[in-house]
Image (cartoon, helix red, strand yellow):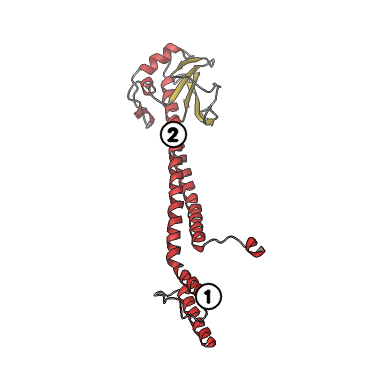
Amino acid sequence: MENEQTRPKFVSLKVKWALGTAVGSLLISLVVVTVLFGSFTRDLLHQERRALKDNLVTISRQLGEVTTSNNLTSQQVNDLLQKRTAPLKGTDAGKVYQRPVIQGFSNSHLVVGIYNRDQHLVFTTGQLKKPFHAVKDEQIKLVAGRHHKVLVGRIPVYNHQTQRLTGYLQIENNLNNYYQRYQRLLLISGLALTLVVIASGLLGYGLSYLILRPLDDIQTTILALRDDPTKNQRVPELNRHDELAELSQIFNAMLDRMQRYIE
């Protein structure tokens, strides 16, 4: 009675095989999905960063055409950005802006803020979430936001003729599109991993059932002979060439020898 209570719980080899297959497939798939997921999201973020950089360069060069003063004003910026721009020679960035620059940001996820030399805001296309601070060179970095990180780019603006500082430019990308794709890709990856685990578990169980089926025949034969050792019952012959087939042949030979001893 005590031995029956302490006896370990029986777990079928088929179940163990199915669980092992599912876990193995999960680990391999997890590594592959993690590599692909990381590579894809890095490419998406790189595209967002490159787009912001192109806009920084294009608009700062456009603002550098202001020659009427050494300090940007709201009127100057509005008049300049309402003009139809021409491609910049030797660059690809200018080819994007064949229409008024301000029109390009009317329905954009980018928010542009232009500051004068005294760091006062003179123009904006929306609400800037991050405070401005002066920079000496172009600067693009990820900063913490309310819900997720925000991509912020800043660059000083210099007059093309005098090469004197006339103001600053700040562009923010809320990265909503990036994080929407990120979440969608994360969901797809999770569903794919779930399907892999379920499919591999079912496939492993099915294969184990086919491969380990001779064990059921051996078990049936043993149970029959346990009740009646003189019973002439043997493991059915297997039309296969593997370890289980050899085990069945050895087991049948042992039963034949035992039967002769009994007789």
| Frontmost residue, 246 versus 99 | 246
Q: Distance between the residues labelled 1 and 2?
A: 67 Å
Q: Is residue 64 visible?
A: no
Q: What amino acid is found at the position of numbered circle 1 in the picture?
A: Asp
Nearer to us in this view, 224 or 218: 224
Q: Name the residue under label 1.
A: 227
Tell me the quarter of the image containing the N terminus.
Answer: bottom right
Q: Residue at x 45, y 12 (%)?
A: 74
Residue 5 in sight in this render: yes
| Label 1: element kind | helix
Could you say which is closer to the camera, residue 26 or residue 64? 26
**Residue at 54 percent of width and 61 percent of height:** 11
Q: Local crowd at mark 1 within 10 Å, few (<14), some, or many (≥20)?
A: few
- Residue 209 is left or right of residue 5, and the answer is left
**Mark closer to the chain start, 1 or 2:** 2
- Indicate the position of residue 232 as horizontal and vertical percent values: 46, 81
How many tags in the picture?
A: 2
Q: In this view, does 76 lie above or below 88?
A: above
SS at circle 2: helix
Image position, residue 255 (x, y; %):
50, 81
- Residue 180 marker: 2
Depth check, front residue: 160 or 29: 29
Q: Where is residue 199 in the image (x, y as percent from the top left)?
A: 42, 53
Q: Where is residue 19 in the image (x, y as percent from the top left)?
A: 50, 57
Identified at 51% across, 74% down, the residue is 222
Tag in front: 1 or 2:
1
